[in-house]
Image (tube, helix red, strand yellow):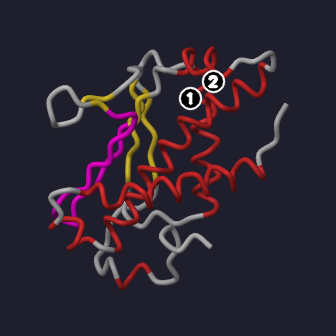
């Protein structure tokens, strides 16, 4: 069960008209294979889950993203405004595909490719888990100075969602 990601009545959290869904934006330089895999994954997510407040996902060609704290980086960032009426955003670093491909290669190219792409898909699902927590527990989200309490939950859900996707995706 994917309780964080699912809801029978989003109206109890959102009682106003707003744009919904996921939008993807790829920076020039993002590997075409990463772009294809992310697009297919998000198409599948749209079929499986509802995204009640529009969330654009920006894919950067860099290996890591800079975080507010100096010298700290991340592979993904969820930006959830304090005002729930404002649209959030997600940024994903997608520039490490070739490096991940090389790290995962042990004689089986398809397996290395799947593992390298799964890392990026995991980042998407991880940040989307923060998106759903931001909607469902907005006041607590905004009051927390340290949102790391949600990290374990996001890792769990991301792993489960990517595993669900892997169970249904066709491999060439």
Query: From the viewer's perspective, is 168 left or right of 6?
Result: right
Q: Which quarter of the figure has residue 150?
A: bottom left
For residue 110, above or below residue 57:
above
Q: Position of residue 94 (x, y in %)?
A: 47, 27
Q: Dot 2 lies on which element? A: helix
Residue at image position (20%, 73%) is 139
Which residue sits at x=37%, y=57%?
Answer: 130
Which numbered disc covers residue 127?
none
The reply to whether discs 2 and 1 touch (Cβ–Cβ < 8 Å) is yes
Examine the rendered structure and indicate whether residue 55 appears above or below residue 6. above
**Residue drawn 55% across the image and 21% down it:** 97
Residue of label 1: 35
Look at mark 2 in the image and give the residue it sits on. Answer: 33
Instruction: Tell me the magenta residue range.
Output: 74-91
Residue 19: x and y in percent read 36, 61
Q: Is residue 83 above or below residue 170?
A: below
Dot 1 falls on a residue whose secondary structure is helix
């Amino acid at each position: 069960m994917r309780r964080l990601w699912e809801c029978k009545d989003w109206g109890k959290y959102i009682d106003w008209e707003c744009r919904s869904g996921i939008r993807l934006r790829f920076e020039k330089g993002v590997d075409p294979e990463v772009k294809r895999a992310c697009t297919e994954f998000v198409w599948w997510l749209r079929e499986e889950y509802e995204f009640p407040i529009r969330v654009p996902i920006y894919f950067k060609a860099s290996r890591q993203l800079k975080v507010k704290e100096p010298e700290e980086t991340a592979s993904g960032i969820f930006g959830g405004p304090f005002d729930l009426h404002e649209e959030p955003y997600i940024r994903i670093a997608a520039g490490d595909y070739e490096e991940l491909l090389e790290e995962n290669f042990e004689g089986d190219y398809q397996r290395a490719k799947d593992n390298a792409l799964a890392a990026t898909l995991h980042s998407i699902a991880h940040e989307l888990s923060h998106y759903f927590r931001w909607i469902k527990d907005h006041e607590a989200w905004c009051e927390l100075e340290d949102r790391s309490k949600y990290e374990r939950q996001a890792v769990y859900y991301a792993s489960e969602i990517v595993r669900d996707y892997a169970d249904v995706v066709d491999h060439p």
